[in-house]
Image (cartoon, grey):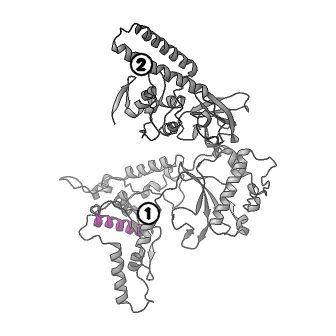
Amino acid sequence: MGSHLCSGIRIPYTVCSIYWNSHSKYIVSSRTQVPFNDGLYSLVNQDGFTVLDIAVLTGNWSIVRTLQQAGATESNAGDLAHHLDDLLFSAEKKRSELSGAMVGGNYPKETEKEHLKWERRVKFLRKMKSGLEKLQIPKAPQSASVEVIDATRVRIGFQESQQPLHQHNVVITKYKVEWSVDEWKNVEGHVELFDLRRMSAVIEGLSQGRRHHFRICAGNVRGYGPTVATTPPSAVPSSWRDIDNRKPRMDGLLWELEDLFKQVRNSRPEHASEIKAIEPGQETPLVQRKAQKKKSLMQLFTHAPKFQKSLKSQKILVATTWEDVKSLRQDMEQAGSASHLPYRIKLLQAAANMQSVLGLQDLGQFYHKPIKDSSGTYVFCTVKHVKSTKAVSAMNVRWVPLAKLREKKTTGQGTNSANNETPLTAGDMLINSLQEQITYSQVSQVPLRRGLYLGYLKLQSSVDQLQVIVPGRIPNMFPHIKLRDNPHISREEWEWLQNLKQHSWRKSDDPGGGGEKDNTKNNDSPSPAQAAWRKQLVSGVQRLLQELNIEEGKWSLHRLFTGEVLELNSDVTLLPVASPS
């Protein structure tokens, strides 16, 4: 795309056509492709106008929406009527001077061109002034909402008014959000929104724990129209942790675990992780170990008070990765003769052998359950996605299509077994479960989108295992539904949940169905924010139980876990709904 020097700013031809062709009544049409550049449409020309200013004041409604979708904003030049009067006065004065110079007919050709230019400018400025006078202030937005997103911030969402855009000389180019802490006796602050591509705003720096009222109004170059209060009309920036000043579950623990892991690494002798070559005259590692005090992984968890205070008897937590398999195995071999160590050493030895055979250090993600056949053979499987087959460099392995492997195994089973009662071996079960393991690995790595979720928790325990119900399509998560996009729960919402004396999820108790009851421990009526939260929560629980095909008569037996909000990460939170059995 070409460019042209316009008012000392180099911008594309399409934008110049909006700036200058308007002077000769040839403004760009809505069919013209407008390039999307966030900073481009905030530029002003020599008169202090942006592209959007000119399109609005000249009544080119067909292009206003296109410009706004591209990020165009108004100039916010203050008293626009006074500014246009000054420009028009200067233009008319210059035109009069040129008209006087042309009296008598003896004048240069350049003077005539200059006079024609200023004549067009006067007409264009008059058109803009007329457009400003005809422009009307917009009505209030159709609706607005507020939600607390952390202890000092809220998000305001809004919708345009029902009036058709650009009809009857009405256009919206900005919004203003105001808030008050004394029920509108005074306005505490305000924020103006000029970029209309996103119909929401985040208000920051609010007073934690203090109730704020919010309202919003729409405006244009003529000014702002009437306001509309948000729903609910007020909000208290806060967090559910404010009730008991509870810290995050993992607050500081990751640093402590990392520090412990570093101490474990640094406590081992230099030759523990890798046997070094023995130089002439150098003592062997065996002599070195005899000459020094032995330091092993197990010695870190002896009666030394530095480590023993927070650890329970015979319960050791060690963080390790595939890179630490070899060193961890060597440490365990030096640790002693505890009954559980040989089994663990064999597992680490098997992992080390697998790494050596495949030439691959990272063996991937463990499958959630081992394969066990009738003879008692166990197979622990890992799944690793590699971008190229060359990532596995081994002489005694090769790649084969999964379908071919299945076909070969099926053929072998048909020729070797005469009946269907032959028990499957661990190898057969492994091949049969390959696709399931691959699918599990793929879908279990798909993260949940940002929001607050309700999860259905149902456990089944036995002597050797603990099972939980999960959906087939997302096996790394409880059966769940998304409650809302905002993962944060405010103190106001959490207080209502803590004050419930019973949980009733029946449709007859739905606030929208006319059967709402006061199930709180006191007789205080809920605030508008709490009422909206209750309606949202009850509707979500009903939807979750319906999707799981649970009879409505058993809904009241389910309980919502209110001990804490499970924060899976900064963007995803979960409230578990516990099954009665």
Instruction: State which quadrant residue 378 falls in.
Output: bottom left
Which quadrant is home to the N terminus? top left
Q: Residue lying farthest front?
A: 105
- Write the residue at 41% across / 19% down: 117
Magenta highlight: main SS:
helix
Give the residue drawn at x 73%, y 33%. 183
**Residue, far right:** 523
Q: Amino acid at mark 1?
A: Gln
Circle 1: element type: helix
Q: Which residue is mark 2?
A: 116
Report which residue position mark 1 lands on. 442
Nearer to me, 419 or 82? 82
- Which of label 2 and label 1 is nearer to you? 2
Asked if the magenta segment contains residue 1, the reply would be: no
Residue drawn where x is 42% and y is 37% of the image? 37
**Label 2 sits on what residue type?**
Leu
**497 or 94: nearer the viewer:** 94
